[in-house]
Image (cartoon, coloured by chain):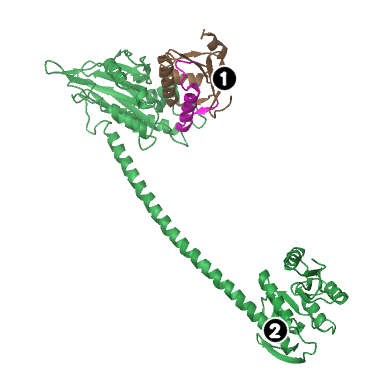
Chain colours: A green, B brown
């Protein structure tokens, strides 16, 4: 292609002066693709030598180049009688009006701004080649004022006209590009606004649903709180104190204490495995069976044949619950429970445990004791009978029921609090009021779990037996 | 044979060996995945013999017991056998607290456990 003879309709002999290899390569490729023979020089001086070796049909020159700039090169071409009629295009950024004066002064025929559109450059070349400058174009000195400064420019009239028109055309082309870019921008902006509106709408929707969910959770938490001791619960011969801290809004733990009849009180702590919504749903379901109100539902009390209230033994309650709640039906959820029935006049405590941590007895005088009862968690083994144990309290004795959120509370090294620490904490606070001992134990648990806080629900129920006589 | 994320499986005779890969079996996601993987492994087996190896497990939530309970029920119903081994003392405590050490067949190590399958 480079051998194509100059002067044919499509292919002409082009000389390119460009110091950037990458830009030169791109330009040369575009020109050769368009069918032109191309020579390339790295600076104005080399380009001038090459132009003198063989007169090109047209020259395209960069401005910023080492050794000899585009202006100097242009001037050299335009003052060389053999070359001055060769059209010369300057590639400029045209960032300053002075550039135009410099171009005029150098005698450039045309400006193409960088970055250029290949088609635009080829179009410029074609029009320059179609209207050749006569060798005889007269020289005149023109006085031009730019940016408050006067310049005297030596240039032929035709040349000045060509250059200014090309500058103008260039500006028009740039302006059109700007208008097109502006239109694209405005389309993009419209789209953005639309997207923004959609996002806002989605955000509102999320907030709305979130608020709904929070309301639902709070409603559920309220239902769950109904499983806890009533505010006004009072037993004839016992003081009670309790703490219940779910680790999420909804818990698998619950506890309660209430009179079953005039002489008996029932008390329990239930711990459904896991926590959160599924555990809480199961807790509420289980809770409905553990009510002191005589009903078809209650497993704790029923109407006897003689119309009197019959109190189920703790072992019966555990056995019944185990019959009702087999783990398969609840996707692996099971629960542990310690349920006791206290005979208020005598201090006899009957209790059964279904895999639940042992209860703690703090005698009025003497050491702390743990009292456990064997039994699998509810839901593990169908049709087992639960064992029952009895503990005789003496006046002033305290007992504590709790969930494994107390003993299994983990510190930052995954070390559980353990029964020993529990016994020390409760035993050490024997002299303080019952309420203070329960509050103190919760504080101990929370301290132990610093900084993360308890990862399980924490339930503590304390009772002090104080018979009236 | 290593197609699972949470468990490593093998077979000794007809006994399915399941080794838990996790050090901590605490959150629900891990638990769900273990459950799914064991279900996939045992698939349609009725009453398989299964040995669970807890050798890697350092921490385990009590919710895992529920999963073991379900598995135990399913296997025993089909007249299979479920045994466990390599349970470190801290983990054994979780079983003991809930009396489940008396429900499950727990052995010192894999060879001892395997010997009891005969």
| Part of the protein shown in magenta | B21-49
Report if residue A249 lies within the magenta region: no
**Number of marks drawn:** 2
- Residues flagged by tags 2 and 1 on a common chain: no
- Of badges 2 and 1, the one in the foreground is 2
The residue indicated by pointer 2 is A162
The alpha-carbon separation of the residues under discs 2 and 1 comes to 87 Å
Which residue ends up furthest to the right in the rendered image? Answer: A53
Question: Visible in this render: residue A437?
Answer: no
Residue at x-position 65% and y-position 85%: A147
Residue at x-position 23% and y-position 26%: A291
Q: Chain of mark 1?
A: B
x%, y% of residue B86? 54, 17
x%, y% of residue A423? 40, 22
Image quarter of the N terminus of chain A: bottom right
The residue indicated by pointer 1 is B10
Q: Is residue B105 above or below residue A21?
A: above
Going by the image, does A223 lie left or right of B113? left
Residue at x-position 85% and y-position 72%: A46
To which quarter of the image does residue A118 belong? bottom right
């Amino acid at each position: 292609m480079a051998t194509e003879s100059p002067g044919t309709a499509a292919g002409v002999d082009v000389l390119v002066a460009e110091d950037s290899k990458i830009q030169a390569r791109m330009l040369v490729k575009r020109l050769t693709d368009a069918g032109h023979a191309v020579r390339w020089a790295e600076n104005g001086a080399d380009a001038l030598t090459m132009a003198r070796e063989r007169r090109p049909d047209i020259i395209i020159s960069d401005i910023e180049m080492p050794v000899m700039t585009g202006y100097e090169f242009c001037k050299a071409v335009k003052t060389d009688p053999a070359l001055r009629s060769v059209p010369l295009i300057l590639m400029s950024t045209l960032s300053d009006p002075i550039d135009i004066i410099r171009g005029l002064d150098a005698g450039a025929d045309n400006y193409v701004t960088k970055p250029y559109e290949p088609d635009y450059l080829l179009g410029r070349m074609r029009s320059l080649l179609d209207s050749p400058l006569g060798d005889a174009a007269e020289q005149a000195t023109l006085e031009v004022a730019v940016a408050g400064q006067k310049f005297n420019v030596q240039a032929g009239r035709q040349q000045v006209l060509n250059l200014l028109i090309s500058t103008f055309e260039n500006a028009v082309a740039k302006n059109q590009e700007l208008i097109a870019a502006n239109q694209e921008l405005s389309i993009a902006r419209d789209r953005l606004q639309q997207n923004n509106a959609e996002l806002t709408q989605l955000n509102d929707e999320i907030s709305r649903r979130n608020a709904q969910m929070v309301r639902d959770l709070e409603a559920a938490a309220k239902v769950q709180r109904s499983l806890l001791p009533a505010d006004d619960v009072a037993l004839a011969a016992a003081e009670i104190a309790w703490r219940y801290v779910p680790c999420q809004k909804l818990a698998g733990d619950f506890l309660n204490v209430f009179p079953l009849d005039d002489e008996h009180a029932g008390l329990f702590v239930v711990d459904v495995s896991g926590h959160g919504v599924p555990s809480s749903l199961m807790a509420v379901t289980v809770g409905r069976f553990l009510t002191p109100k005589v009903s078809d539902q209650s497993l704790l009390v029923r109407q006897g044949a003689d119309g009197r209230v019959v109190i189920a033994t703790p072992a019966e309650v555990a056995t019944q619950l185990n019959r009702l709640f087999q783990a398969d039906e609840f996707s692996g959820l099971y629960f542990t429970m310690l349920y006791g029935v206290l005979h208020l006049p005598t201090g006899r405590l009957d209790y059964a445990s279904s895999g639940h941590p042992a209860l703690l007895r703090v005698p009025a005088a003497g050491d702390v004791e743990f009292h456990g009862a064997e039994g699998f968690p509810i839901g593990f083994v169908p049709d087992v009978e639960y064992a029952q144990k009895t503990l005789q309290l003496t006046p002033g004795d305290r007992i504590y029921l709790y969930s494994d959120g107390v003993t299994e509370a983990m510190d930052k090294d995954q070390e559980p609090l353990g029964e020993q620490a529990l016994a020390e904490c409760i035993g050490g606070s024997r002299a303080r009021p019952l309420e203070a001992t329960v509050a103190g134990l919760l504080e101990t648990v929370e301290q132990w779990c610093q900084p993360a806080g308890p990862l399980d629900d924490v339930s503590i129920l304390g009772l002090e037996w104080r018979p009236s006589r | 044979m290593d197609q699972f994320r949470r468990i490593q499986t093998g077979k000794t005779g007809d006994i399915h060996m399941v080794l838990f890969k996790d050090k901590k079996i605490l959150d629900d996601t891990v638990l769900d995945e273990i459950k799914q993987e064991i279900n996939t492994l045992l698939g349609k087996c009725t009453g398989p013999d299964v040995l669970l190896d807890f050798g890697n497990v350092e921490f385990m939530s009590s919710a895992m017991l529920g999963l073991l309970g379900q598995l135990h029920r399913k296997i025993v119903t089909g007249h299979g056998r479920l045994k466990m081994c390599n349970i470190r003392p801290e983990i054994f405590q979780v079983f003991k607290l809930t009396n489940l050490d008396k429900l499950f067949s727990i052995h010192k190590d894999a060879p001892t456990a395997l010997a009891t399958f005969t």
